[in-house]
Amino acid sequence: MSGNIRLLDDTLAAARAEGRSALIAYLPAGFPTVDGGIAAVKAAFDGGADVVEIGLPHSDPVLDGPVIQTADDIALRGGVRIADVMRTVREAFEATGRPVLVMTYWNPIDRYGVERFTAELAEAGGAGCILPDLPVQESALWREHADKHGLATVFVVAPSSKDARLAEITAAGSGFVYAASLMGVTGTRASVGEQAQDLVGRTRATTDLPVCVGLGVSNAEQAAEVAGFADGVIVGSAFVKRMLDAPDESTGLAAVRALAADLAKGVRRTG
């Protein structure tokens, strides 16, 4: 089975045709449990997310802030494995027909095997992978197998990236470009800031790929601000925090659904 990069492309294009940004949610697999994580992804889609990124929990998530680190720790202590990540992708895709990606550090893929990982992700209906710590110059093997299986390769650019580096990164990527709105780890912020708008402009000068902004967005007002200049708004920690703060799973799922609905309104009213 081929992966769903075409579905991802079509979904982002449809949002653009509607004159709005896409809403991309992030939730880790296995949190609070494997079944609970699958339910959370479905809840985000139910609320209005266009795309969901499934996090592959890692024992040393150097780019993630305390909220996602806490969720990853719960998932890892619960025994989550790559097979559970693939199951999460499969069940979320089969239930919704929407694009589902995996976001992961490189080390787990390297250990698991690139060919095996890409084949299983495509077979599960995945649309691609976001690889925040894989240098473009070391990505040829991954991209070869991702292309073979119809998977997007999403790279991350940062405000510190020079223009020549941006061009190198975007030329190698597919699906969309993940623009980190600021330096540092993931987490909600009081303001997403002008750095993100500058980075989107510089990135767009190098590529026709959609440019989606993550790190720091937590409410409809910030989503509207980012939607004013980006093709997609990526929200992670705010969703995870709703699940962490909930007294029980059903309350958490309702909170995820409500946040997605609020953010979906935000991406539709720019400025």
Image: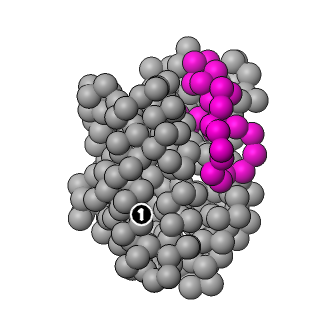
Question: Foreground: 83 or 163?
Answer: 163
Percent across and percent down for residue 141 are 57, 45
Query: Which amino acid type corresponds to the residue marked 1 in the rendered image?
Result: Val
Q: Could you tell me which secondary element the residue under label 1 belongs to? A: helix
Percent across and percent down for residue 24 are 43, 47
Disc 1 crowd, CA 10 A, few/some/many (<14, 14-19, 20+): many
17 sits to left or right of 152: left
Give residue 91's quadrant in the image. bottom left
Question: Foreground: 225 or 108?
Answer: 225
Percent across and percent down for residue 77 are 62, 84
Compared with 117, 175 (above or below) is: above
Percent across and percent down for residue 236 are 54, 55
Question: Is residue 136 among the parts visible in the rendering?
Answer: no
Segment colored magenta: 175-202
Give residue 105's quadrant in the image. bottom right
Question: Residue drawn 57% across and 18% down?
Answer: 201
Residue that badge 1 annotates: 256
Give residue 248's quadrant in the image. bottom left
Question: Residue drawn 69% across and 18% down?
Answer: 163
